[in-house]
Amino acid sequence: IVFILCEKWRTDMDAKNKDEMKSYMDSQIDEINKHKWIESEKACHDLGETAVIDWIVHHAADFRREWEEKHKTELSGNE
């Protein structure tokens, strides 16, 4: 599910940006796992894929914008 979220962005990136993509994916997976853990703790059981989908629907766009803004200098330096 997480990788579907990044499919278009991934295909737009070339080989010289693989490190940035890995960093983005690793950061995104960390945030999804935090969200899953917090929401599962609140529910007193593992929400699994439901929490992942919730993060995608409610937080993925903001995460991407914030990540790109934070890494804008690094990304533009690779062009």
Image: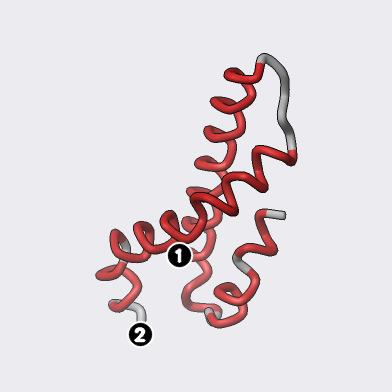
Q: Earlier in the sequence, mark 1 or mark 2?
A: 1
**Residue 41 drawn above or below residue 51:** above
Residue flagged by tag 1: what amino acid is it?
Glu
> Who's the residue at 59% across and 36% down the image?
33
**Residue 68 drawn above or below residue 41:** below
Depth check: 8 or 75 in front? 8
Q: State the image coordinates of residue 31 (x, y, percent, origin top left).
A: 50, 41
Whether pointer 1 and pointer 2 mark residues with C-beta atoms closer than 8 Å, the reply is no
Q: State the image coordinates of residue 70 (x, y, percent, origin top left).
A: 29, 59
Secondary element at tag 2: loop
Q: Which mark is residue 75?
A: none
> Who's the residue at 61% across and 33% down the image?
36
**Residue 61 drawn above or below residue 73:** above
Depth check: 29 or 41 in front? 41
Residue of label 1? 20
- Which quarter of the picture shows residue 9? bottom right
- Which quarter of the picture shows residue 76? bottom left
Secondary element at tag 1: helix
